Image (cartoon, rainbow, N blue to C red):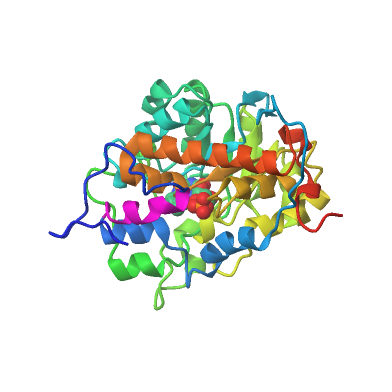
């Protein structure tokens, strides 16, 4: 059911959460009604036909959980140690660029919400607010997501800024050397409006994002590919930073091994929310293959793509993930109601995770393993 204004045009953000919103998925329609259709296409669509984007959600639904009875779970918790940081729960805010497209306060609202819910937040290289400003309001761990820039000196500057701002980890995203084939963005004519841009890239001569369109000159000749990151850059980033480095966008066990050989401290199994290679499998389906190669007890494996329920978080942890990242769910909350929307999304996910743990007999995260999945071994 649409909540759109009868006069047309996006509705203003809500000041409080209506009772019709009982689950993260309920936010989608409220968010859609509050942004321009082209912004909605940017936020919600996948690349190509959207097959991977849809499968990210379906893959979680294909997995089943095993109910367990009469376990003593009173006094349990969802706490974890992740890269020398204690987190209250394993739900992180994924890096999403240009959040001021969704709400005037953009990343600042998200950081406030993450702080209130004691969630770690990953700030995108393409954030629409300066990193230092975000860090000044954040009271929970901040990580910085790095896109290796064509100007490697600028890349080093970004790393130093992240360190100086107090970020506790770097997340180097490697799955988007070119922008995915965003047909829905093309159909709606999406473009960044004046005044909203990648605030932390100001001052850098950036190669324009290379949209893949039929009829273009060969992509292989584009300047963007000539300066795209390679494995040597991952080694270099690991050398240049005193922060732990996670590589985001890994889907193949061989790439996982190579990232660790380059010095990475962890991996984010991700297909960029289905926004890069359409046809890629869901990350939750890639996770067991990678966890079979890389010992997830020694190396933190995180996963994202399609997490909308606490049961999804439980399923990811059962398959070897240490934590999950949530992109669109949080952004639907942001577009709907700013900081309180994001906070509510995080609260719902954490509460649902706890409920799922109780019903599968897990008193803490250490108790979660493949045994919570159906069928029992
Ligand atoms: C609108 C949008 C912008 C994104 N921007 C970035 C980004 O700047 N850097 C990055 O590493 N990932 C980016 N991502 C991918 C997310 O970090 C994450 O991998 C993905 O959203 C997870 O899937 P989910 O949206 O189903 O939770 C973006 C995703 C969306 C939807």
Q: Is 226 left or right of 298, judged from the image as shown?
A: left
Verify whether residue 25 appears in magenta: yes
Residue 163 is situated, as x and y percent measured from the top left of the image, at 53, 24
- 205 within the magenta span: no
Residue 233 visible to an observer of this rendering: no
Residue 282 lies left or right of residue 178; in this view the side is: right
Snapshot quadrant of residue 263: top right
Whether residue 315 can be seen here: yes
| Highlighted magenta segment, given as a residue range | 24-35
Is 212 placed above or below 67 here? below
Residue situated furthest left in the rendering: 7
Viewer-side residue, 367 vs 328:
367
Corner quadrant of residue 126: top left
User: For the point 46% across and 58% down, which residue is it?
Assistant: 223
**Which quarter shows the C terminus?**
bottom right
Q: Which quarter shows the N terminus?
A: bottom left
Q: Nearer the viewer, residue 96 or 228?
A: 96
Furthest-right residue in this view: 377
């Amino acid at each position: 059911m649409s909540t759109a204004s009868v006069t047309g045009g996006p509705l203003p953000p809500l000041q409080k959460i209506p009772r019709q919103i009982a689950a993260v998925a309920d936010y989608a329609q409220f968010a859609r009604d509050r942004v321009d259709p082209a912004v909605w296409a940017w936020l919600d669509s996948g690349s190509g036909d959207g097959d991977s984007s849809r499968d990210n959600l379906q893959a979680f639904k294909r997995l089943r959980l095993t109910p367990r009875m009469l376990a003593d779970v009173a006094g349990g918790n969802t706490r974890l140690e992740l890269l020398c940081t204690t987190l209250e729960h394993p739900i992180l805010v994924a890096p999403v660029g240009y959040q001021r497209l969704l709400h005037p306060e953009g990343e600042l609202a998200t950081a406030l919400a993450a702080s209130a819910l004691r969630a770690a937040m990953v700030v995108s290289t393409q954030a629409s607010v300066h990193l230092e400003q975000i860090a000044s309001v954040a009271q929970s761990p901040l990580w910085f997501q790095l896109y290796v820039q064509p100007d490697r000196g600028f890349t080093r500057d970004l790393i130093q800024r992240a360190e100086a701002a107090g970020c506790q980890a770097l997340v180097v995203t490697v799955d988007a050397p070119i922008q995915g084939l965003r047909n829905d963005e093309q159909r709606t004519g999406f473009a960044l409006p004046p005044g909203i841009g990648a605030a932390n890239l100001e001052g850098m001569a950036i190669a324009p994002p290379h949209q893949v369109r039929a009829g273009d000159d060969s992509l292989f000749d584009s300047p963007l590919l000539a300066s795209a990151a390679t494995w040597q850059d991952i080694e270099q980033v690991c050398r240049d930073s005193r922060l732990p480095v996670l590589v985001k966008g890994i889907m193949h066990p061989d790439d996982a091994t190579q990232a660790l050989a380059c010095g990475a401290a962890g991996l984010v199994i991700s297909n960029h929310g289905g926004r890069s290679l359409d046809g890629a499998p869901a990350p939750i389906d890639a996770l067991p293959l990678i966890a079979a190669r890389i010992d997830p007890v020694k190396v933190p494996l995180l996963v994202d793509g399609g997490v909308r329920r606490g049961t999804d978080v439980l399923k990811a942890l059962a398959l070897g993930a240490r934590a999950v990242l949530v992109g669109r769910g949080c952004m639907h909350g942001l577009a709907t109601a700013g900081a309180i929307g994001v906070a509510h999304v995080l609260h719902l996910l954490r509460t649902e995770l706890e409920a799922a743990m109780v019903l599968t007999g897990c008193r803490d995260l250490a108790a979660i393993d493949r045994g919570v999945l159906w069928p029992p071994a």
